[in-house]
Structures are given as C-alpha cells and as structure tokens.
Image (spheres, helix red, strand yellow):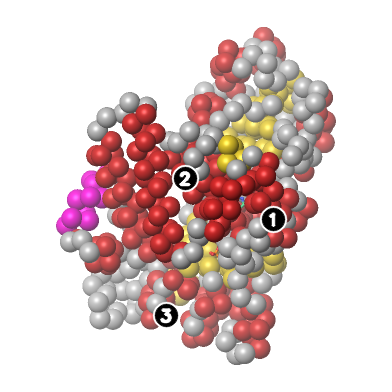
C-alpha cells in the first residue's frame, strides 16, 4: 500500500477549512482540519505529525504564529504554510522569522494552494489518494471515513458537494457499510454543523411509540405520557435528522412525515401549538424501497421526497482494496482504546482478510479487529489468528460476550503491566457507563425505562449517572 501524505489545515473559518481540505483531498492528500491552534496541538499529542500544515494567523485563542513557534520547537522539519488575510508586514515578517515555508494571502486560488503544497512537501511525499473524510476540530471524536477505491473517492466528493446543498439525500447500502457515518459526514460538512445531528433508527422503536418519538407529545397525550416530551424533529431544529431504516416506518406515519416535510410544521401528539422546525432529513435504508413501493408498503410520494439524491454505499466485498487501510485503522484504534500493546498484520493475515466476503461489511471487519487486538497472542497477527477469529464468530451473542470479556481481560493486563493500581474502581465505572449509555440510547434518553431495562432502580441509575450528567 502506498504511503499516505497527511496535511493539516488549521483555520477558525470553516468555509476556508472546507474548501481547502476538499481541494487538497481531491489532489490525493489525506486532510484533517482543526478550528484552533490548541486543537491541532492536542492532536499532535495523540497521533503522528502531518507531512505539511496550513495555518491561519488570526484565530480566537492562540494565533497561528504562536502555533508555528511551538511546532518549530517540537517538529523542526515540519513544513508550515501560513495563511492570512492580513498581509501586513508584521505578520508576514513574523511568519518567516518563525520558520514558515510559505505565506499564502487570502483570498487565494485553490489551485495555487494545492500547487504550493506540492512544492513544499518533501520529495517522495507524493499524494497517495486515500482521501479520509475530514476530522474537523469541533468533531475531533468523529470517525474518519476511510477508503481510497474509486467508488469511495467518488462518494467523498459527493458528500462534499451535497453537504453544501440543502437537498434531501437517501443513503442506501447493506448493513454495516457506513450509512450512519456518511450521514454524520454530510452534517459535519454542512452549514448546519454547529447545530444538532439527531439519529433515529425507525426499526428499533416500537411502531406505537414512533410518532411521539419523532414529533413529541404533550403531558397526558396518552396513557403513560406524564410529562411533555420533545420529539426528535424539534431536537434537530437547525440541524440534521438521520432516519435510519426508513423502510420500516409504518404507513400512517409515512403520511404524517410527508406532510411535515412539505410544510415544515407539525403538532406534538396531543398538542395544539403549531411547531415550526428547520430540519434537514437524511434517510437511509438497506431495503430496496422501490420494491416496497410496488408492494404498497412504502409511499411513492415520500420516496420521491426523500430520494432527491441517492448515495449508494458499496458492500465491502466490492472494494476489497480498502480492507488493509480499514483493518490497520481499526486495529490501531482498538489497541489504543483497550490500552493494549500495538499489533500489526502479517502479510498472510491481510491476504486472508481481503479474501473474506464480509457479509456484515465494515462493521464486521471492525469487530474482528477488536477481537484480534484483544485476543491474538503475538505482536504480529498471523493468517491462523484471522482464521480462528473468523471461525469463532458464531453464534453472535455468545461471541459478543466472549469478545467483551477478553477485551476486558486484555485491558486489565495492560493496566497491571503499566503498574496501575486500584483498577477495579475504574473498570466498574467504565462498565456502568457503558451499560447506562447503551440503555439510555436504546430508550431515547428515558431514564425510568432505561432503569427498568437494566433491572436497576431509578434512583440507583440516577446516582450512577452522577451529578455532572446532563439529562437528555
Ligand atoms: N468507510 C469507513 N471508514 C471507517 N469506518 C467505517 C466506514 N464505514 C463504516 N465504518 C464503521 O463501521 C461501523 C458500521 O457503520 P455504520 O453504523 O455507519 O453502518 P450502517 O450502514 O449505518 O449500518 P446499519 O445499516 O446496520 O445501521 C461503524 O462503527 C463505522 O464507524
């Protein structure tokens, strides 16, 4: 696999970050964006330095010149291009004194910026085209979309363009192909990025609760509705609402959704107040909606409304060239999150991974890498390790539990090796947090229901959540 050339763009103006990152990505660089000097410095502690960095001069907090100074101390050979609208002598001189390679005055021509990157980058650091989607600073924890096959690169370009246009997007693809991740990227790159991204899996919520989940209800609207509940549409106001598994939506609700999409307003269940919202709906499905329409199970007019542009995510077996990059990234992040020693794939192991059919797509590969990070005995993961991990998969539930226990054991071993003490308390806290968060996510934030599902008293759940936790 070709080496990737990584470029970071530091600018508090997301429009600049976006256009520059897109142009650099289209030129084949892997680009991450940061909205402040501090965000870039924090990232430098967490991952390897990039091959080139663009920075703005004037930003809230620490400016670009202070960043340059710190970078030059820690990474003297890292080329830095300083960008600024303030082409005054002071900042230009300051930039060159600080060791900047080039100065780019704003507004700049994107082609010039890319040409400058090519000129400044060390010889041999040619772009290799794996265009990870941006990890912008405000979403530092957001996962990058990995992939460099033509299908994925075309997808990234579409995301870049579609994010800017307020059109409805329907994302289709098999389970685990990354539909939610793509929806998040569409939101993150859109002018709505600072407003909420709210996801709702239509298939995971009982049909009778779905309406109030989407549109909210007033107190007393139905038995059990003691308090007013704000629905997902209102929660997403100004932002994006991701409706996953839209094909599972019951017909009467499809009718209601269509009306809300057309009018942009609705009543909460049992409510009299007309609620107006500005929400971009991004829908996803793994089902062929045209067939559901033919069967009378999905409204044709709703399909037309949601399906202005379609993003089709290819199954992993149709882009096997992406497997190594994905596998390396998952293995690396699994080891880091487990606090386990880093591992690598031996050649035979990677061949085996590439040959597999991946019915569960990227999610299956990700889970497998977690198992390997936790279980494989040596530093190098062999073909036999992969064989074993693939074979050990069924039955899924038992396997899930086994992987979890092994991951926990691996975490404990690593902590003990590092000489940490009192890890039981930390493990318990993480255990509680994982269970509580999963249960709250499952119940859409309803605490009593989450407590019941977990078999805990409501007070116990509240205590475990701690005082710092915001009520959702
Ligand atoms: N291109 C990718 N790069 C990195 N990670 C990915 C990619 N595609 C998917 N993933 C990871 O795989 C997992 C599954 O992705 P996601 O939940 O977005 O799939 P999905 O298509 O929405 O699945 P489902 O239809 O089952 O809801 C996630 O953990 C996601 O982070």
Against 12, is 310 above or below? below
Locate residue 430: give its quadrant.
top left
Q: Is residue 264 left or right of residue 425?
A: right
In this rendering, which labeled residue sits more in front, label 3 or label 2? 2
Q: Which residue, given by chain and number where applicable, does mark 3 sit on? A: 207
Asked if residue 464 is among those painted magenta in the image, a careful observer would answer yes
Q: Are the two marked residues, 1 and 3, in contact with CB atoms closer than 8 angstroms?
A: no
Q: Residues within 10 Å of mark 3 (few under 14, many from 20)?
A: some
Asked if residue 207 is among those painted magenta in the image, a careful observer would answer no
Q: Residue at x 50, y 60 (%)?
A: 393
Q: Locate residue 292, reporting x and y percent.
A: 62, 84
Q: Looking at the image, tell me whether mark 1 or mark 3 is earlier in sequence order.
A: 3
Where on the image, by quarter, is ligand 1? bottom right
Residue 329 at least partly seen: no
Q: Locate residue 353, reporting x and y percent.
A: 65, 51
Residues 5 and 268: in front is 5
Q: Which residue, given by chain and number where applicable, does mark 1 sit on? A: 355
* Element on which disc 1 rests: helix
Q: Which residue, given by chain and number where applicable, does mark 2 sit on? A: 375
In this rendering, which labeled residue sits more in front, label 1 or label 3? 1
Alpha carbon of mark 3 to alpha carbon of mark 2: how far?
Answer: 40 Å
Q: Is residue 153 left or right of residue 333?
A: right
Q: Looking at the image, tell me whether mark 1 or mark 2 is earlier in sequence order.
A: 1
Residue 196 at least partly seen: yes
Q: Which residues are magenta?
A: 459-468
Residues 396 and 184: in front is 396
Alpha carbon of mark 1 to alpha carbon of mark 3: how far?
Answer: 40 Å
Residue at the farthest front position: 384
């Amino acid at each position: 696999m070709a080496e990737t050339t990584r470029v970071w763009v530091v600018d508090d103006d997301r429009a600049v970050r976006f256009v520059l990152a897109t142009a650099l990505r289209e030129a084949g660089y892997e680009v991450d964006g940061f909205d402040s000097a501090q965000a870039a410095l924090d990232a430098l502690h967490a991952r390897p330095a990039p091959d080139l960095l663009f920075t703005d001069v004037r930003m809230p907090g620490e400016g670009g010149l202070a960043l340059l100074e710190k970078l030059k101390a820690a990474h003297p050979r890292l080329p830095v291009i300083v960008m600024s609208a303030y082409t005054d002598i002071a900042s230009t001189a300051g930039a060159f004194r600080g060791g900047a390679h080039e100065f780019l005055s704003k507004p700049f021509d994107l082609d010039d910026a890319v040409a400058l990157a090519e000129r400044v980058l060390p010889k041999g650091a040619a772009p290799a085209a794996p265009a990870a989607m941006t990890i912008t600073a405000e979403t530092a924890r957001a996962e990058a979309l990995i992939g460099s096959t033509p299908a994925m690169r075309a997808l990234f370009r579409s995301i870049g363009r579609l994010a800017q246009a307020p059109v409805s997007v329907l994302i289709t693809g098999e389970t685990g192909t990354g539909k939610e991740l793509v929806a998040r990227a569409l939101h993150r790159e859109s002018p709505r990025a600072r407003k909420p991204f709210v996801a709702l899996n239509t298939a995971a919520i009982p049909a009778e609760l779905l309406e109030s989940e989407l549109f909210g209800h007033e107190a007393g609207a139905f038995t059990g509705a003691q308090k007013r509940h704000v629905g997902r549409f209102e929660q997403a106001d100004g932002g994006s609402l991701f409706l996953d598994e839209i094909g599972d939506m019951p017909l009467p609700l499809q009718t209601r959704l269509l009306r809300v999409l057309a009018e942009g307003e609705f009543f909460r269940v049992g409510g009299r107040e007309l609620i107006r919202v500005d929400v971009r709906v991004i829908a996803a499905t793994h089902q062929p909606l045209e067939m559901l329409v033919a069967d009378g199970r999905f409204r044709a007019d709703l399909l037309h409304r949601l399906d202005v542009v379609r993003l089709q995510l290819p199954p992993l077996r149709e882009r096997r060239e992406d497997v190594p990059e994905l596998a390396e990234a998952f293995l690396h992040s699994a080891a880091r999150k487990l606090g386990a020693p880093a591992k690598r794939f031996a050649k035979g192991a990677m061949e085996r991974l590439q040959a597999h059919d991946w019915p569960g797509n990227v999610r299956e590969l990700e889970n497998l890498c977690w198992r390997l990070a936790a279980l494989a005995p040596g530093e190098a993961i062999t073909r036999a390790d992969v064989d074993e991990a693939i074979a050990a998969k069924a039955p899924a539930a038992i396997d899930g539990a086994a992987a979890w226990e092994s991951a926990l054991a691996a975490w404990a071993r690593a902590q003990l090796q590092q000489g940490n003490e009192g890890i039981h308390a930390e493990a318990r806290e993480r255990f509680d947090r994982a269970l509580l968060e999963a249960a709250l996510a499952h119940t859409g934030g309803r605490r009593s229901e989450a407590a019941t599902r977990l078999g805990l008293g409501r007070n116990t759940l509240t205590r475990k959540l701690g005082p710092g936790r915001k009520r959702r």
